[in-house]
Image (tube, rainbow, N blue to C red):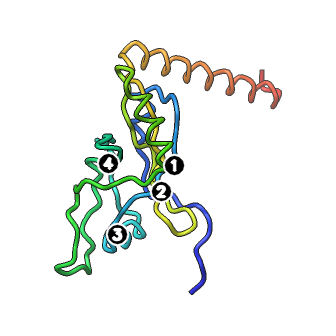
Amino acid sequence: MPKETGHKLIASNRKARHNYAILDTYEAGLALRGTEVKTLREGKANMADSFGIVDRGEIFLHHVHIPEYTQGSWTNHEPRRVRKMLLHAREITKIEDQLKESGLAIVPLSMYFKDGKVKVEIGIGRGKKLYDKRQDMAKRDADREIQRALGRRNKGMS
């Protein structure tokens, strides 16, 4: 069987960048069971309310919903079980040091296959206030309008 290569997105947490200002990102592996990997290969996962917690020098991922494998038997997994993230010890201590600052959290951003292995991109984020979200939306709308105007100008429409 040929070895898998490339990058295939499974799920992304689209609300994460809306609700958090991401300060730093890391790539982590996940300790999974066989039926979880089979379900992820089908592209089924939900990261909507997920978060990470540091516990005794290890980082765990909570509230990621990976549905049960349809052809699975008694060996099937729990859909919302706590999963261990695989990081180097120096990365874990760096994350722990960052989290000592108040208002920061571990936010999973996306889940993907990288060379056949499941990876999670996590970010250290600070929760945004409502006015920050409004400013981001206004800036995004202004940038979009500028791009439209440039496009019209380049086409010679106005």
Amino acid bearing label 4: Phe
Mark 3 neighbour density, 10 Å: few (under 14) some (14–19) many (20 or more): some
Q: Earlier in the sequence, mark 3 or mark 1?
A: 1
Q: Are marks 3 and 1 in contact (CB under 8 Å)?
A: no
Mark 4 or 2, which is nearer the eye?
A: 4
Q: What residue did someone put label 3 on?
A: 39
Mark 4 neighbour density, 10 Å: few (under 14) some (14–19) many (20 or more): some
Q: What residue did someone put label 1 on?
A: 27
Give the residue at x 51% y 48%: 27
Mark 3 to mark 2 CA distance (whole Å): 15 Å
Amino acid bearing label 3: Thr
Amino acid bearing label 2: Lys
Disc 2 is placed on an element classified as: strand
Q: Looking at the image, which residue sits at the far top?
A: 131
Q: What residue did someone put label 2 on?
A: 119
Q: Is residue 101 above or below residue 121?
A: above
- Quadrant, the N terminus: bottom right
Q: Is residue 99 above or below residue 67?
A: above
Amino acid bearing label 1: Glu
